[in-house]
Image (cartoon, rainbow, N blue to C red):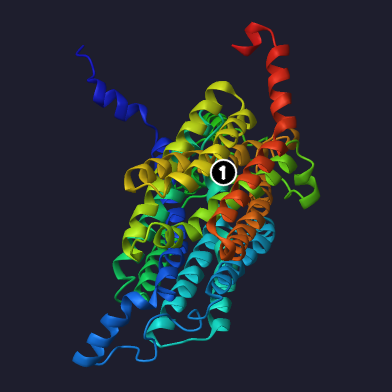
Amino acid sequence: MAAVPPGIRLLVSFSREQWYRALTFGLTFLLYTCFHLSRKPISIVKSELHKNCSSVSELATAMSAGGQLLHTDVGCSWKPFDKSNYKQLLGAMDYSFLCAYAVGMYLSGIIGERLPIRLYLTVGMLASGLFTCLFGLGYIYNIHSLSFYIFVQVMNGLVQTTGWPSVVTCIGNWFGKGRRGLIMGLWNSHTSVGNILGSLIAGYWVSSNWGLSFIVPGIIIAGMGVACFLFLIEHPNDLKRMYLQSSSADKKPEKRSWKGERGRSAGLQYKDSSKQSCDTELLLPRDAASVALQPVVVVRREAEPSPISFMGALRIPGVVEFSLCLLFAKLVSYTFLFWLPLYMTKAAHLDAKKAGDLSTLFDVGGIVGGILAGVFSDRSGKRASTCAVMLLLAAPVLYGFSRISRFGLGPTIAMLLVCGGLVNGPYALITTAVSADLGTHKSLKGNARALSTVTAIIDGTGSVGAALGPLLAGLLSAGGWNQVFYMLMTADFLALLLLLRLVMKEVTSHKSRPPAAVE
């Protein structure tokens, strides 16, 4: 008998569930890429909302002589960000989004456990697309009200909380703990990919029509919301139920003898009990020896576990420590996310587009850092220790970046890559693999519905830091950018301190195990 080619064996070995697992991985990756793609434009457009008026005065004069400007009342900066306290106004706008995101995140996980994830995520993406477009329409319709932009940011922050608990729950349902760090490290690169694409899209229109820098990402995320509704499968059990229902619908009732039917039903029942999450029973009178009857199939679903309470999630070992650590880690990451392009324009004297393109290197470093953190934590089995090492290295690197960025483009590029990896590595590991581990902790006794709440608590606490970081950066930058970097280094050190208890626990538990148990 001829041997089967390896490629054919590989295709055959992939079951239907594995193909759907790959589909879920790719789809959730794209879905959350769109969330970050729609958040990034504000950091690129900041340098356009408040420009260096002396550098554009000649251009404005030339354009007014040759033809009428699109917005004649905006000679340089965009009102109301043309005032001397523009950094505080921009910081308040960031804070309004991130504060609403942090508050809404605590509620989002609880709500997400009680609603179908596919519908919940679809509505959130459509609403996020709407409010992202509204911000860009402020340019089209010449709106200069600060309250309008803050309102749009608050609403966008609230609806974007539907994203993270939903996608983490989906990916956690489909992938086990075997290589969770590596898989989620690769998957979590959607954060950096979204930031890069958002920077490129926003940078393309930032100088000519910054309204499109928001409208185009808004349309993209809304379109992906429709794709989510059409294609997302929340759980492998949903796939099994779907095929069970379709197979039972395709079967035509036939009249068979009781003995033959009983044998077939017994075989069907044995097969379904091993592969399906439901029971199949044949309801027939026991004294019907050879009567031709039509089988009646009853599908009995197992009772789903009740959602976990907020306090119950906090009692899971490690949730409090990792949540507080993420608060300071995300403070650092989001300060870079919202203020790095503006810092590059002021410190390195770059234009808005070039500063936006250069800031994508920080996200490239974040992709590498997230993957490395996942690989190391998988091999060592020590999530907290992996985060602690990267946090320890990040503080001196941040100080070096504040100094080396003044010495030319080459050193700046290198430090952006290193900073991105060390800053985003712990943030990526905690929000993905650690959250999934804690959401499926052995103390939950198999209650997978706790994953959404645990993820929301961890990321919601981290979002408090994400809200504080850009706000503090706006306040401290008035006294010089060095103060901002000192604040970031302090936050990194506090994040490290909060993990020390878990690090000691990991080290001591490793030493206490015999070699066979470790292997």
Residue 226 placed where, x, y %?
Answer: 41, 64
Q: Nearer the viewer, residue 291 or 325?
A: 325
Residue 29 placed where, x, y %?
Answer: 43, 48
Residue 472 falls in image quadrant: bottom right
Q: Nearer the viewer, residue 202 or 5?
A: 202
Q: Nearer the viewer, residue 198 or 252?
A: 198
Residue under circle 1?
Answer: 427
Residue 390 placed where, x, y %?
Answer: 56, 34
Q: How many marks?
A: 1
Picture quarter with the N terminus: top left
Left or right, 187 with respect to 197, comes to right
Left or right, 234 with respect to 458, comes to left
Q: In the figure, 349 relative to 316: above or below?
A: below
Kind of residue at badge 1: Tyr
Picture quarter with the C terminus: top right
Q: Residue at x 39, y 91 (%)?
A: 73
